[in-house]
Amino acid sequence: MPVTVLLVDDEPLVRAGLRAVLEAQPDIKVVGEAADGAAVIPLVRRLRPVVVAMDVRMPLLDGIEATRAVLRTVDAPPKIVVITTFENDEYVYEALRAGADGFLLKRARPAEIVHAVRLVAEGESLLFPASVRQLAARYGDDGGNRAARAVLERARLTEREADVLRLMTRGLSNAEIAARLVVGTETVKSHVSAVLAKLGARDRTQAVITAYESGFVAPG
Amino acid sequence: MPVTVLLVDDEPLVRAGLRAVLEAQPDIKVVGEAADGAAVIPLVRRLRPVVVAMDVRMPLLDGIEATRAVLRTVDAPPKIVVITTFENDEYVYEALRAGADGFLLKRARPAEIVHAVRLVAEGESLLFPASVRQLAARYGDDGGNRAARAVLERARLTEREADVLRLMTRGLSNAEIAARLVVGTETVKSHVSAVLAKLGARDRTQAVITAYESGFVAPG
DNA sequence: GAGCGGCTCCCCCGTGCGGGGGAGGCTCGT
DNA sequence: ACGAGCCTCCCCCGCACGGGGGAGCCGCTC
């Protein structure tokens, strides 16, 4: 009785790689592929995979939203392993909060990928160790919990804070942002501080980085 | 007489993907894999592949340097296809200048990847069209050449400056960068100033934005 | 060997930034 | 009518940042 897996990634190359790695195992069977999050739900309904291996960054519907959607609309939902290229705490906790069972880096070794799929199939959760280490390093000594809280409060940017962050990502200074929004610089400073706190960023540079890494803004 | 290919990428997953895609062709044979640029030269000497599919970003020796090294030290060198994740990568032109014969995006469809390998094997060059279009759109109307020049002249960052910029894009302060590079903070400040001047950035935040927008670094 | 570019380090100096407080007005929902 | 949340503005304060200089060392080229 094989572990059936649905692959969701917008890059055919990555899908091919996952397929090659997983199909090499006698107890794992790739039963389908999807190129974006929007296609996941009907495929899950039809194929009923045990595990869904899902990329974070995808067109139409990203991995986080797709995870939420699957868990909300499908009964007896599959286990979900979220896969991404870069270690990024925002993704990790967004994904786990959305209900994902595991988190994997694309640079993981094939054996680790296989191991992750088997583990979540058995009902275990899994965090690829490197991610946890990074989180702990970034937020101090008591690791996960505090980091989780910091990140969890992040998603709640107010409209004004989002405006400010958006202008920050365009390289504007506080004074310039103030002029653009027609408010005082002190107001901008308040918003900036709030943004930094919510993003767990130390300064505006880190905030901008998080904005790019989280997809709040996109290059190009 | 099959086209023999050496795969060079630090992610086993991508290697597996390329292998799956290419081995599906009767006339293409993957004869070896390497996980970093440093391992390429001995492998090329031993395996004598017709084509090397090489990632840009790799530990130890990146794809550009590895390309240069292969072309400089191996006689009757293989054709080299450089592969990267993101379009609009300033490395594209570095790669072609280094002597690469083709440029490919990881998100390319399998058929395109196969086509690229066959093409360079026959001595043709290839630029994946989407990249040229994006570059042209950004830098003006007359297409590739001017865009290439713009990119190359835009930021002739020295190696050290590139190191510093890379760490800036990870949110590090000058002191942290200094510690990481094992130099004084004054040195870092010098490099940072040089980077800001070359990028036309007012502060580190703008530099990081430029780094993202130009593809110097890419979000996950 | 003179020159040049890159890496390293040093000085001074102004200021934008971010933390820590607080406070008033506004629109909500209950 | 009341509190909650948001937006707005204010204070003080320390510090990292970035500009403008300069300087010595190395390896390269001419």
Image: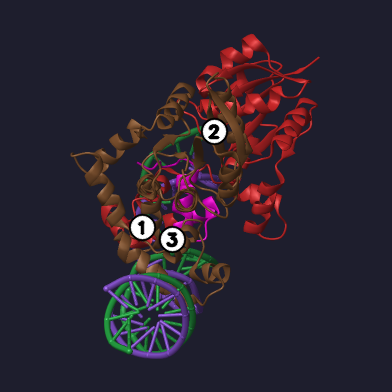
Chain colours: A red, B brown, C green, D purple
Q: x%, y% of residue B83?
A: 47, 38
Q: Which mark is residue B206?
A: 1
Considering only order in the chain, which callout, 3 or 1, is on the residue closer to the N terminus? 3
Considering only order in the chain, which callout, 2 or 3, is on the residue closer to the N terminus? 2
Q: Residues within 10 Å of mark 1 (few under 14, many from 20)?
A: many
Q: Residues within 10 Å of mark 2 (few under 14, many from 20)?
A: many
Q: Which mark is residue B5?
A: 2
Q: Indicate which label's residue lies in the foreground, 3 or 2.
A: 2
Considering only order in the chain, which callout, 1 or 2, is on the residue closer to the N terminus? 2
**CB under 8 Å between callouts 1 and 3?**
no
A215 left or right, relative to D4: left
Image point (20%, 42%), residue name:
B140
Q: Residues within 10 Å of mark 3 (few under 14, many from 20)?
A: some
Question: Looking at the picture, which amino acid does disc 3 mark?
Answer: Ala
Q: x%, y% of residue A81?
A: 66, 31
Whether residue A8 is visible = no
Whether residue A27 is visible = yes
User: Between A38 and B148, which is closer to the camera in this rendering?
Assistant: B148
